[in-house]
Amino acid sequence: MKRVSIFGATGSIGQNTIDLIKRAPSEYQVVALTGGGNVRQLAADARALNAEVAVIADPARLPDLRAALEGTTVECAAGATALQEAASRPADWVMSAIIGAAGLRPGLAALAQGATLALANKETLVAAGPLVMSEAARHEATILPVDSEHSAIFQALAGEAPASVERVILTASGGAFRDWPLAKLETATPEEAATHPNWDMGQRITIDSASMFNKALEVIEAREFFGFEPEQIEVLIHPESMVHALVGHVDGGLMAHLGAPDMRHAIGYALHWPARAPLPVARLDLAALGKLTFSDPDPARYPALDLAQRVMRRGGLSGAIFNAAKERALDHFIARRIGFTDMARIVSAVLDRTDATAGVVDAEFTLDNVLNADHLARIRTDEIIASRG
Ligand code: NDP
């Protein structure tokens, strides 16, 4: 039996992972399931899967979790330390699907115990790529990408010499505002930004798809995970979301990965890797689709993509700063304190300010320094927003 833990079990990726595990319960022993605040879902799944431990990030919800799991053998715990402890419990396969930088520490703890880390939490690599990759190597742990684009690249690279890769192309649906007049973006609401044309995802990543901050994070994630140079990574708008990524080789050949927009493919691929197993995802009917379309992203509509290039060129801890500023700007947008287009302007201003503060971006790549840079970027974001009045 494969011992599995799911961090962020109550979210969109977590629930898709649980869907796959529930289809073959005899193959899995569930070690840890975690949630942020959704006790009802966490308790229901911990009961159904007979988890060893259920952890809720919000300590105030621990009494509710205990009550919901009364009469079972499931241990209950809460808070950041409990998340760390749960990630240290021996498991063969750990899904990292907490949203945001909060996923970093549990991911590192899972690597330290040598688990295979199925990485949906792209923020882990954006904020701390060199640290995470070196920890994986040190503990002989495997990281498998779960972002659909990175899973697609990983699959397209199988059996290929890394040196033969000339470029990679990440596709993007273009999000909710792909066809909106540019001027209207200023007034876009969180509700409008949180509707995705193709993928069914959590609220935050859906808004990040509309702004393409999500794609910006993925570009940096591709650099950190695969080691591509910034200029090798391209983005194409592909409204149908059927081609997830393409790998271009030195001989001009392009290897594309196609599939229905269903995260259970990338999750299932990571769950069964290195084997392939049947998955409950729709099969593409290319004749019915008729055609697939592509176009270049407009830099004026998606300024986050230029910010990603800037972050990659700057290097150091600028990924941690970029991610934290983006997370905080998104909080303010969701709270209606800033507009949709303000997010990129504010993140850019935070990068300017931290660049000008000696020792932040170029500090040594340790966990403490990553967390300090993250903290500072959140403070700077709040300051910039407050100074706007
Ligand atoms: P969701 O918002 O749907 O779920 C996030 C999960 O994290 C929930 O379980 C939530 O708990 C938990 N959580 C939130 N805050 C904290 C915290 N501070 N500490 C601990 N747990 C917390 O997100 P998604 O599933 O959409 O995304 C998860 C990750 O996967 C992200 O990094 C995203 O970028 C990535 N990803 C997602 C894709 C998708 O299709 N959704 C595709 C590719 C990558 P609760 O709900 O109980 O509050």
Image: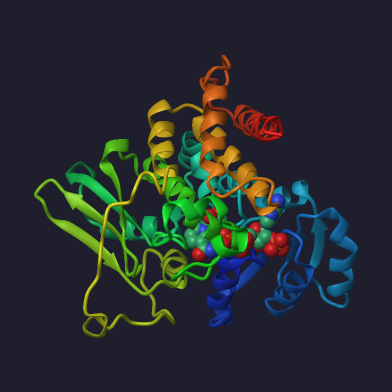
In the image, is residue 260 above or below residue 251?
below
Figure quarter occupied by ligand 1: bottom right
Residue lying at the far front in this picture: please name it: 183
Q: Position of residue 267 (x, y in %)?
A: 47, 67
Judged left or right of residue 128, residue 251 is left
The residue depicted at 28 percent of the width and 52 percent of the height is: 296
Q: Residue at x 73, y 58 (%)?
A: 36
Residue 33: which quarter of the image? Answer: bottom right
**On the rendered image, what quadrant is the N terminus found in?**
bottom right
Q: How far across and down, in percent of the image, does residue 115 sit? A: 54, 53
Name which residue lies at 22% across and 56% down: 159
In this rendering, position of residue 317 left or right of residue 169:
right
Between 300 and 27, the one nearer to me in the picture: 300
Position of residue 271 in the picture relative to residue 381 (left or right): left
Q: How is the image coloured?
A: rainbow
| Front residue (pair 145, 317) | 317
Residue 308, how many percent across, how many down? 42, 39
Farthest residue in the top direction? 358
Image-quadrant location for residue 290: bottom left
In percent of width and height, residue 65 lies at 84, 67
Q: Relative to 249, does residue 198 appear above or below in the rendering?
A: below
- Quarter holding the C terminus? top right
Q: Residue at x 38, y 46 (%)?
A: 222
91 is higher (above) or lower (below) than 302: below
Nearest the eye: 74 or 120: 120
